[in-house]
């Protein structure tokens, strides 16, 4: 792919990421300026000491995990619009699977970027319409005692279960190790953060993939040697 494409991509991706960061601080700073109500530095310091170690780990894990899958364009878009794990990543993976292209290729880069861009626009429109349409009734259907409460509490597991079922069925040998490791971690350490759990299961997936690859490589080498031996005996 043309290097100029990536040069422009990194420039505009950096610009919009910094613009999004500025916008995030605009509202709280604006409210503090208007009402002259600034949070105490000591309180902010205590909160940051608790949150920063967790979010630094999560941020590093997400970058290392998502960039090879989503590509440069998809990554910039995803980190600006958010909802990566539950919307952007599944959308990009499904689009590449349907287009029969692989991640970290030129085709995968294009498909991932387009699908995530469409996903961002679509979700923004749907959220806007949903907020306006369901604002009057949403507090009632999500309130304690509502028959819909349990469904709203399980939206994310249902989404990932539906998306993961296809991958687990196709690559069950590869999926077995991270699932078992993840379940064991949650059994013995149920308060483990999502970022740390994700990193652990990714490492388990890599280890499982290496083991499976070595086994398949040994089988292939043995098969090739057997074929050569048989052909040699036939020639004699």
Image: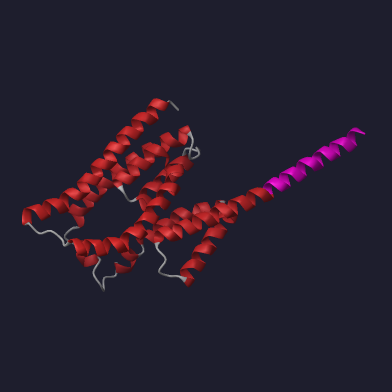
Q: Is residue 26 above or below residue 108?
A: below
The residue nearer to you, when weighing 219 against 100, is 219
Q: Quadrant of the C terminus?
A: top right
Q: Quadrant of the N terminus?
A: top left
* Residue displayed at 50% across by 52% down: 166
* Residue displayed at 85% across by 40% down: 230
- Asked whether residue 36 appears in the rendered view, the answer is yes
Query: Which percent across, then down, holds residue 95?
Result: 43, 41
* Residue displayed at 41% across by 58% down: 195
Give the overall secondary structure of the magenta segment. helix
**178 left or right of 225 in image:** left
- Asked whether residue 116 appears in the rendered view, the answer is no
Q: Is residue 30 above or below residue 44?
A: above
Query: Which percent across, then down, holds residue 69?
Result: 45, 44
Q: In the image, which residues are magenta?
A: 216-236
**173 left or right of 133 in image:** right
Query: Which percent across, then down, holds residue 43?
Result: 21, 64
**190 left or right of 124 in image:** right
**229 left or right of 23 in image:** right
The answer to if 223 sits in the magenta stretch is yes
């Amino acid at each position: 792919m043309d290097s100029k494409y990536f040069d422009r991509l990194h420039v505009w991706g950096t610009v919009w990421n910094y613009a999004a960061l500025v916008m995030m601080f605009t509202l709280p700073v604006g409210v503090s300026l208007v009402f002259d109500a600034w949070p105490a530095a000591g309180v902010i310091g205590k909160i940051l000491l608790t949150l920063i170690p967790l979010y630094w780990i999560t941020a590093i894990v997400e970058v290392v995990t998502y960039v090879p899958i989503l590509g440069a364009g998809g990554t910039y878009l995803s980190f600006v619009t958010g909802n990566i794990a539950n919307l952007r990543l599944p959308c990009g993976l499904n689009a590449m699977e349907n287009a029969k292209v692989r991640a970290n290729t030129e085709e995968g880069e294009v498909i991932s970027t387009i699908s995530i861009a469409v996903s961002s626009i679509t979700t923004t429109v749907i959220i806007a319409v949903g907020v306006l349409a369901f604002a009057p009734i949403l507090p009632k259907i999500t309130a304690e005692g509502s028959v819909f409460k349990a469904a709203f509490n399980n939206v994310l597991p249902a989404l990932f279960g539906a998306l993961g079922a296809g991958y687990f069925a196709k690559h069950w040998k590869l999926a077995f190790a991270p699932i078992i490791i993840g379940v064991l971690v949650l059994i013995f350490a149920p308060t483990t953060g999502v970022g740390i759990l994700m990193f652990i299961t990714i490492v388990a997936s890599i280890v499982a993939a290496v083991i499976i690859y070595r086994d398949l490589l040994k089988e292939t080498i043995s098969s090739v040697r057997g074929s050569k031996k048989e052909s040699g005996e036939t020639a004699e």
